[in-house]
Structure formats: C-alpha cells, structure tokens
Amino acid sequence: MIHKLTYNNRVLSAEERTEFCRISDEYINEFSGYIEGIHQLAKEYHVSDNSDYNKITKTIIDIETFTNYAFCDCIVLNKLFVRATNPYEKSFVRGKLKVQLNESFKRLYGFKKGYETSYCAQLEKIITMFPGFRREFDELLSDLEQISKDPWWKDVRDAEVHIDISKLYELRHEEINESKIVMETWQLIELFNHINRFICRLHRVYLNYMAAQFIKENGYIPSV
C-alpha cells in the first residue's frame, strides 16, 4: 500500500550526505550487476517450440531489464541531486531526475492512457499462469493506479524534454526543497524495486518448475 508522502524540510548534514551516497553506490553496483546478468540471459535465450515458454521467458527478461535500468538510473540521478552544491547544477539535476521518474512510470504503468502498451500490461498477460502471484500483483496494480491519478511533474517533464526556454527559466529558479524531492523520488524508486523483486521471485519459481518438469520427463537434472 502506498503511504502518504511526508517530509520534514531537513537539510542533510555532510555526514548524512556521505552516507546517503555510500548506500546509493551499493545499490548502483548491485543493480548494474543485475543488468549484466539479465543481458547475458537474454543472449543465451533460444526460441522454443513451446509458445507459453517463449511468452513467459521474453516477458520476464524484458521487464527485469526495464526495472533494473529504471531503478539504477533513478538512484544515480538521486545521488547526483543530493551531492550537487551549485544551485544551477542542483536545479538541472532535479529536472532530469523528474523526467526519468516520469518516463519510467509511464513505461511501467502509464497515466490516464498508455496502460495497454506498458510493461505491467505485458506482465498481466502471463500472470494467469502463476496463480500464487495474483494477489500480490493486484496489490501492485492498485498502488500504481493510485499514483497514476496524479500527473506529477508533467510540466517539468515537458519543459525539460522539449527545452521550453520560458518554462525552463521559471522551473529552474524555483526554490528547491531537498527533503521533498528526495522523499517523492524514493517513493517511486521503492515501487520499482518492489516490482523488480516480485519479477525475480516469479522468475525463480518458473525456473524451478521448468527444471522439475525436465527431471520428470528425462530423469536427470539439465546441465547449466
């Protein structure tokens, strides 16, 4: 369940800023490794005569790749935002961070339109084959639907992407509430991470099922 955003307007101390960046680096190293792993899996994937296998495998690979990139890219930009000291630099990074979050959410779920071409729509097409995951998936969709009702940062996204100079000037000179930006960002980053963990667990269950079926049919464990 998505909780109401709260922020306390605190400015991080130098020590807290260093710790924030350290944790961010751990996430970046971890998820960039996941990206390489899923890329290798995609390279090794071979089309099967089993259409369900092809559909499930491709969907899982595509969504895992996307969520890993979305999570890692947002962490990188959030870290740069927190580290920035020059007012223009901080304002610039804030704009790019909001574009990244807006576009990532749009590809993941969509806003008022766009769900049919989203990654969640692709996942929904295979989730019927995993009944044990249906309830959690529905809860995730509920969270995503709640967030999608607020067209957050659309003005920022449009100004930054289309380089609308008059609008950019206005946005780049807004007072920055660092606490508010970071809390808004982490709400979405954590949601990306939740979905990524969900997909990873579903993937493990599917691989275990395929291995069990292979053993049942052939009497031995397939070589890796």
Image: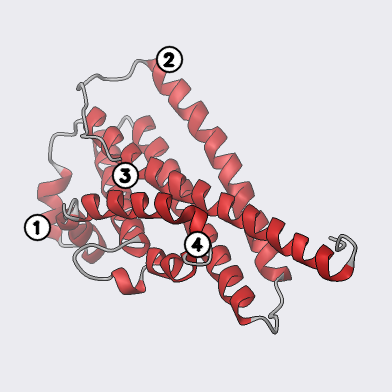
Q: How far separated are the C-alphas under marks 4 and 2?
A: 36 Å
Q: Position of residue 179 (x, y in %)?
A: 25, 28
Q: Of marks 1 and 4, which one's residue comes earlier in the chain?
A: 4
Q: Is residue 96 left or right of residue 80?
A: left
The residue shown at (15%, 62%) is 164
Residue assigned mark 1: 166
Q: Of marks 3 and 2, which one's residue comes earlier in the chain?
A: 2
Residue assigned mark 3: 93
The residue shown at (21%, 28%) is 6
Q: Position of residue 26 (x, y in %)?
A: 56, 33
Residue assigned mark 4: 63
| Discs 4, 3 touching: Cβ within 8 Å | no
Q: Secondary structure at mark 3?
A: helix
Q: How far separated are the C-alphas under marks 4 and 3?
A: 26 Å
Q: Position of residue 147 (x, y in %)?
A: 23, 50
Q: How far separated are the C-alphas under marks 2 and 1?
A: 37 Å
| Circle 1 Cα neighbour tier, 10 Å, few/some/many (<14 / 14–19 / ≥20) | few
Q: Of marks 4 and 3, which one's residue comes earlier in the chain?
A: 4
Q: How far separated are the C-alphas under marks 1 and 4?
A: 37 Å
Nearest to the eye among marks 1 and 4: give it: 4
Nearest to the eye among marks 4 and 2: give it: 4
Nearest to the eye among marks 4 and 3: give it: 4
Work out which residue is located at the far bottom of the displayed protein and give it. 49
Q: Which mark is residue 15?
A: 2
Q: Of marks 1 and 3, which one's residue comes earlier in the chain?
A: 3
| Discs 4, 2 touching: Cβ within 8 Å | no
| Discs 2, 1 touching: Cβ within 8 Å | no
